[in-house]
Image (cartoon, rainbow, N blue to C red):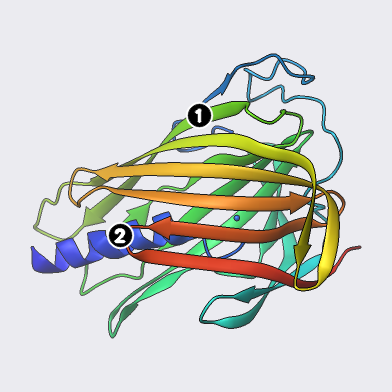
Amino acid sequence: MKKLQRLSAVVLFLSALSFVSCDTEPVDPVLLDNVNNPENPGTNPNNPTNPGTSDGSYWPMALNNEWVFDVEDEGESPMKITSTESIGGNTYYRVNYSFASSGTGDLTGEATNLLRHNNGDYSVRISVIVPDEQGMQITVSPYEYTILKDYLEPGQSWTQDVQQTTSYQMPGVTLPPMVMNFHIENIIQEKGISVTVNGVNYENVIKVKQTQTITSNLTPGMVLTVYYWFAKDVGPIKSESQSGTFTSSSTLVSYTLN
């Protein structure tokens, strides 16, 4: 049971922190996307399958686009779009930056991030891979959430509820799955502002506050707060995150767009 608890903790850590070190539509998880205060220039913003009209590209997605970030206590870390994938008829962009990995010895895991841009909606799809552990097979369902709606105005918000299930299979042993519930609240705090990052001034910036409340049937809950800054025709330029005593920040050093 101790090993199961350790595995559960690793999956929770990977899932929760897989996109907080940088900056970052229903599939397998359950996604409920609701826009609050919907008086905005978007087209049917309450329907996640029909997103609003974009104000421009706040995260340009093309093969070989690259952003290099100075990550607190880690140094420079590049995030590069290396390939595309088709899932459910939608195009996703795979980035080579694994925002979190955890574990020691024979207990390790890795999170993979896919990005999607659909008009004014920008989504992150996270999947976690944990290798077999002494005959135990571990399967983790991916989950996806919208990190930015660029057509909303300051003060407008949206909420999402996603679920991730981790299943364990071991010969002769029945183990309960770990079900993680993510309640994600997002609000546009500022828009059209100028922000200076590492001596470079960026115009037309959107600042987003995201609060994730994460609960599970096998591990204690946690609350993660992340602030993101996105610059028009550039992408993410800055992030700050906090969960309990954990804090992290990253700032854009350079970028290459194709």
Residue at image position (77%, 17%) is 43
Figure quadrant of the N terminus: bottom left
Q: Is residue 243 left or right of residue 253?
A: left
Residue 23, quarter of the rendered image:
bottom right
Instruction: Give the number of the mark in front: 1 or 2.
Output: 1
Residue at image position (74%, 62%) is 83
The residue indicated by pointer 1 is 159
The residue indicated by pointer 2 is 138
Q: Is residue 196 left or right of residue 12?
A: right
Residue at image position (73%, 51%) is 230
Residue at image position (25%, 47%) is 221
Numbered disc 2: secondary structure: strand
Q: Is residue 257 left or right of residue 4?
A: right
What's the amino acid at mark 2?
Ile
- Mark 2: give few (<14), some (14-19) or many (20+) Cα within 10 Å: some
Q: Is residue 179 left or right of residue 22?
A: left
| 182 w.r.t. 79: above or below | above
The disc, 1 or 2, on the residue closer to the chain's N-terminal end is 2
Numbered disc 1: secondary structure: strand
